[in-house]
């Protein structure tokens, strides 16, 4: 399951029908949803929340999926909902859309339908039983405008995951050599983790590197490796976690994914988990799930990654986060 909240700074795109809305989904999720159930939450005319599920997985229990979708919409405190099923199995998509709409009580159903790549059907009357013709394309103005504004739109969910994959082969060997230097560099102050001077370490070795990475300034791989090593110490990692806010979360997504992909695999779960939290804070539930899953692939027992995965799929709004507590 992936979720996405639309960044408030994006330009406004007005969809005239479901075909245009389907073509706007890549700008919302960062990739074109394939064979997916998509639930969108609205406040006024604006989409403020989106959730995507694989159709096949969603169809294993239609009633349970419908209840899940409605619960997430209600937790987001949205006013209206649009429910779409894109791709195959088409009839399963229709069943899911109708099941969700039938359960909408506190949230107003605005529109719904199911679609192939060249035809869509609407769930509400009046609707042509033969459907409506449209053309699904990544060249649609909504996607083009998002790219112009700096958003990256991948060709698929798998393509997004590939950009987040940890290093391998020769590049990984280079990083592991730098890792030995990082450990030696901190051999003194980090010998006894229970006696860490967290404030000093963050001020001297974490904050400056994070600042330069956020500003896109050149940072040597050795410095990134030292940062990654420090994140393996939970008190330091948690201090870095506390630096992520709604205002800077988008920058920290880029920063922590960069760190995760430039440190040894054993050190990467902390950075992936921080990236997952930053993704969730800025509304990118899709990448939040992917980053948390990357961390768990490297270390299935990494508790922060499990927490981030639960958070990203919980339906909780980032607006409920208050210093580590979801209200």
Image: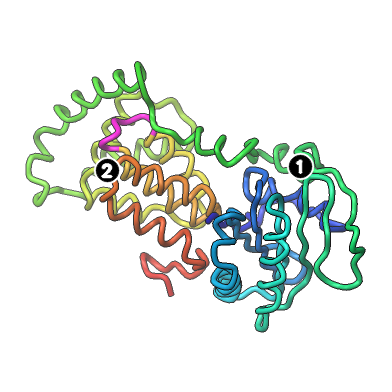
Return the residue nearer the eye: 253 or 70.
Answer: 70
Specify the segment rendered in magenta.
261-267
Q: Say if the magenta span includes residue 266.
A: yes
Image quadrant assignment for residue 224: top left
Q: Is residue 119 above or below residue 51?
A: above
From mark 1 to mark 2, how far is it between C-alphas?
A: 37 Å
x and y percent of residue 198 in the render? 20, 49
For the point 83% across and 45% down, the residue is: 118
Q: Is residue 69 above or below residue 267?
A: below
Q: Say if the magenta span includes residue 268.
A: no
- Residue that carries the numbered disc 1 in the rendered image: 145
x and y percent of residue 155 in the render? 65, 36
Task: Give whichever of discs 1 and 2 has the lower sequence position.
Answer: 1
- Residue that carries the numbered disc 2 in the rendered image: 231
Q: Secondary structure at mark 1?
A: helix
Q: Secondary structure at mark 2?
A: loop
How crowded pointer 1 is (Cα within 10 Å; few <14, some 14-19, many 20+) is rated as: some
For the point 29% across and 47% down, the residue is: 300
């Amino acid at each position: 399951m992936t979720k996405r909240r639309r960044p408030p700074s994006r330009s406004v795109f007005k969809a005239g029908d479901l075909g245009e809305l389907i073509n706007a989904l890549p700008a919302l999720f960062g990739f074109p949803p394939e064979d997916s159930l998509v639930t969108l939450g609205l406040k006024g005319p604006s989409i403020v929340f989106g959730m995507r599920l694989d159709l096949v997985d969603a169809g294993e229990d239609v009633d349970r999926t419908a209840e899940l979708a409605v619960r997430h919409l209600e937790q987001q405190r949205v006013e209206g909902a649009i429910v779409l099923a894109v791709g195959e199995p088409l009839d399963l998509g229709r069943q899911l859309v109708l099941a969700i709409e039938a359960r909408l009580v506190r949230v107003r159903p605005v529109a719904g339908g199911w679609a192939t790549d060249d035809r869509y059907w609407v769930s509400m009357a009046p609707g042509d039983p033969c459907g409506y013709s449209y053309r699904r394309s990544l060249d649609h103005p909504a996607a083009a405008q998002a790219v112009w504004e700096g958003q990256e739109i991948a060709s698929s969910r798998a393509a997004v995951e590939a950009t987040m994959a940890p290093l391998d082969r020769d590049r990984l060997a280079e990083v592991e050599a730098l890792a030995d230097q990082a450990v030696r560099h901190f051999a003194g102050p980090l010998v006894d983790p229970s006696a860490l001077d967290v404030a000093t370490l963050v001020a001297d070795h974490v904050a400056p590197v994070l600042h330069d990475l956020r500003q896109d300034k050149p940072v040597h791989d050795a410095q990134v490796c030292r940062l990654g090593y420090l994140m393996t110490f939970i008190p330091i990692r948690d201090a870095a976690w506390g630096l992520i806010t709604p205002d800077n979360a988008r920058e920290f997504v880029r920063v922590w994914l960069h760190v995760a992909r430039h440190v040894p695999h054993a050190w990467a779960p902390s950075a992936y988990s921080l990236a997952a939290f930053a993704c969730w804070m800025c509304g990118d539930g899709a990448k939040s799930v992917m980053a948390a899953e990357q961390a768990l692939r490297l270390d299935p027992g990494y508790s922060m990654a499990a927490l981030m995965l639960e958070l990203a799929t919980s339906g909780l709004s980032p607006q409920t986060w208050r210093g580590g507590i979801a209200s």
